[in-house]
Amino acid sequence: MIAAMKPELRPVLTEDDLRRTVTDLAERIRADYADTDLLLIGLLKGSFVFMSDLMRALDMPVEVDFMSATSYVGRESSGELVILKGLNESVHQRHVLIVEDIIDTGLTLSRIRERLLLEGPASLEIVTLIDKPARRQADVPVKYVGREIPDLFIVGYGIDFDQKYRWLPYIGTID
Ligand code: 5GP
């Protein structure tokens, strides 16, 4: 069998950068949620690598759930929210932290946030590994931002392009 070629991407965040970013985020979150029962909600699929590293870096008891929603087709946002998998847990009266991989237009996230707020959580905040503020279209409050990047299309560390590249341990750009 011929092994698939490893892609050559321009690195944006190295494995070391990612480790440091996740550790810094975890310290801030741990300080804010000391003595609080926290429910992490990971937005699939892109956040699963970040969420598993963040959860372990938090080093405190948390519960986790996942939901899957998309407003993307290929590389562009269609704007319309489609829920592919809903939550297993109720967020009613829970302290909830939405875990996102990357915020671009913010349209997906702001719609998810509005939907969860309808269920009456005790608190609802957002952590994102990466923010592309230049592309924002929806005003969504993000309490914890790992790294801001310019308007690049990135992949790796859970983030895909047409389901490829999620396995890369670093984040790079295909331009
Ligand atoms: P938004 O609604 O903020 O425009 O879209 C957020 C979602 O779009 C992210 O969770 C991610 O799945 C996808 N996305 C946004 N920017 C990028 C990018 O640079 N690369 C990839 N692969 N996906 C992106």
Image: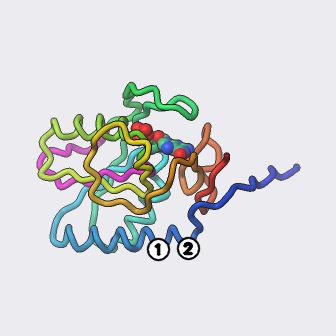
In magenta stretch: residue 46: no
Q: Which residue is mark 1?
A: 20
> Do callouts 1 and 2 mark residues in contact (Cβ within 8 Å)?
yes
Image side of residue 43 versus residue 4, left or right: left
Query: Percent from the top left, x then y, of residue 71?
Result: 43, 31
Q: Residue at x 54, y 49 (%)?
A: 159
Q: Around disc 1, counting alpha carbons within 10 Å, would you say few (fewer than 14), some (14 to 19), or many (20 or more)?
A: few
As helix, strand or loop, the secondary structure at mark 1 comes to helix
Which region shows up in magenta?
87-102
Q: Residue at x 31, y 60 (%)?
A: 144
Query: Percent from the top left, x then y, of residue 157?
Result: 55, 57
Label count reads 2
Q: Which residue is mark 2?
A: 16
Viewer-nearest residue: 149 or 117: 149
Viewer-nearest residue: 72 or 44: 72
Query: Percent from the top left, x then y, of residue 175?
Result: 67, 46
Outermost residue to the right: 1
